[in-house]
Image (cartoon, grey):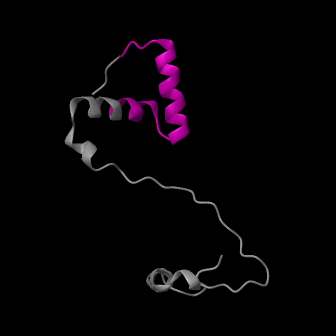
Amino acid sequence: MRTTLNLEDALYRRVKVKAAREGRTVKDVVETALRSLVGDPAMDTPEPRRVRLPLIPARPGRPRLFQGMTTEEIHDRLAGLETDVERAGPDDLPA
């Protein structure tokens, strides 16, 4: 449905900036705000958004601990490291 809203200039500018920062349209930001105001059940499950994570380059000469591993294998290795740290006594931890 199409409608016309008369908004204060300052409010519209803030909405436009928010939309630009989030990579969304002004329509999407206004629609989300209205849904949250009236309690739309669609707000319970937001759409997933892509997140750009920074790449962290490996240092030359350092072993590549997770190269060639599946996600599950990496998870298992990290869980094992956490368990080792939890089991370590105060004398086992570096100062």
Compared to residue 26, the image places residue 82 above or below, namely below
Residue furthest to the front in view is 91
Compared to residue 67, the image places residue 53 above or below, namely above
Compared to residue 75, the image places residue 57 above or below, namely above
Q: In the image, what residue occupies the spot 79% across and 84% down?
A: 61
Q: Quadrant of residue 91?
A: bottom right
Compared to residue 91, the image places residue 29 above or below, namely above
The quarter of the rendered structure image containing the N terminus is top left
Q: Position of residue 89 (x, y in %)?
A: 51, 84
Q: Is residue 67 left or right of residue 87?
A: right
Q: Position of residue 66 (x, y in %)?
A: 58, 84
Q: Is residue 26 magenta?
A: yes
Q: Position of residue 18 (x, y in %)?
A: 50, 33
Q: Nearer the viewer, residue 68 or 65?
A: 65
The quarter of the rendered structure image containing the C terminus is bottom right
Q: In the image, what residue occupies the spot 51% across and 27% down?
A: 16
Q: Position of residue 26 (x, y in %)?
A: 45, 30
Q: Which residues are magenta?
A: 5-31
Q: Quadrant of residue 27?
A: top left
Q: In the image, what residue occupies the spot 39% across and 35% down?
A: 28
Q: Is residue 24 magenta?
A: yes
The kind of secondary structure the magenta stretch mainly shows is helix
Q: In the image, what residue occupies the spot 54% across and 35% down?
A: 20
Q: Is residue 62 left or right of residue 85?
A: right
In the rendered picture of this protein, how many numbered marks are placed on residues?
0
Q: Nearer the viewer, residue 71 or 63?
A: 63
Q: Is residue 31 left or right of residue 68?
A: left
Q: Nearer the viewer, residue 93 or 5?
A: 93
